[in-house]
Image: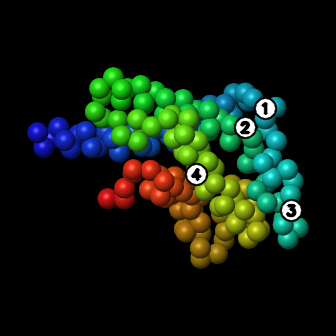
């Protein structure tokens, strides 16, 4: 019984990562194939703060919309699996897939945009790291910004608990 409960819990934790993970893979695929190029409009619409672009050219409607659509789709699939009795799906996915998918995509995108805005104001080019002693911290934030924001928002607004 203990092993079954542990495996179920591990699967539920894994399912919490799937909307982000699959959305990220989908975006990479779409970027590599150059699909939906017409959506490559910068989210900041060239807005500048302190004479520096707010987010830069890499944060576009294409990325945001791919994350939104794929997150909702993954949440819908997880809900369907949950309704069919699969206990390895986290209970959060019994909620509206649109609501949960929007929470995932908005939280992830917000984390990415905040990090991007901070980097632009620090005059760090997109995809580059600082040369200062904060390089490791910046690298960590670059890799985790969206994920940390999703974890925070899920904890704040849903039944996902830290620990």
**Image side of residue 30 versus residue 46, left or right:** left
Disc 2 versus disc 3: distance between alpha carbons? Answer: 21 Å
Left or right: where does residue 98 sit relative to residue 89? right
Which of the pair 135/26 is nearer the observer?
Answer: 26
Q: Which residue is labeled 4 in the image?
A: 107
On screen, residue 133 above or below 116: below
Give the tally of numbered discs. Answer: 4
Where does label 2 land, which residue?
A: 62
Which of pointers 1 and 3 lies earlier in the amino acid sequence? 1
Label 4 – label 3 distance at C-alpha: 23 Å
Instruction: Looking at the image, tell me whether mark 4 or mark 3 is earlier in sequence order.
Output: 3
Q: Earlier in the sequence, mark 4 or mark 2?
A: 2
In which quadrant of the rendered image does the C terminus lie?
bottom left
**Which one is in front, 80 or 10?**
80
> How far apart are the two marked residues, 2 and 1, measured between alpha carbons?
7 Å
- In space, the residues marked 4 and 2 are separated at their CA atoms by 16 Å
Neighbourhood count class around disc 1 (C-alpha, 10 Å): few under 14, some 14–19, many 20 upward: few
**Which residue is pictured at 66% across the width and 61% down the height?**
114
Residue matched to label 3 = 48
Can you tell which quarter of the image residue 120 is in?
A: bottom right
Earlier-in-chain disc, 2 versus 3: 3
How crowded pointer 2 is (Cα within 10 Å; few <14, some 14-19, many 20+) is rated as: many
Residue that mark 1 sits on: 37
**Does residue 159 appear in this view?**
yes
Image quadrant occupied by the N terminus: top left
Please report whichever mark, 1 or 4, sits nearer to the chain's N-terminal start. 1
């Amino acid at each position: 019984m203990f092993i079954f409960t542990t495996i179920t819990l591990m699967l539920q934790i894994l399912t919490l990562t799937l909307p982000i993970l699959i959305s990220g893979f989908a975006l990479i695929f779409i970027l590599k194939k150059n699909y939906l190029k017409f959506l490559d409009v910068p989210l900041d619409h060239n807005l500048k703060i302190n004479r520096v672009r707010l987010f830069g050219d890499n944060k576009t409607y294409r990325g945001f919309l791919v994350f939104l659509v794929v997150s909702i789709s993954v949440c819908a699939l997880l809900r369907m699996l949950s309704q069919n009795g699969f206990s390895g799906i986290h209970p959060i996915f019994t909620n509206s897939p649109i609501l949960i998918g929007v929470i995932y995509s908005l939280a992830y995108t917000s984390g990415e945009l905040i990090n991007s805005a901070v980097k632009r104001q620090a005059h760090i080019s997109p995809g580059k790291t600082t040369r200062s002693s904060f390089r490791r911290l910046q690298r960590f934030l670059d890799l985790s910004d969206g994920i940390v924001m999703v974890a925070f928002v899920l904890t704040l607004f849903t039944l996902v608990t830290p620990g």
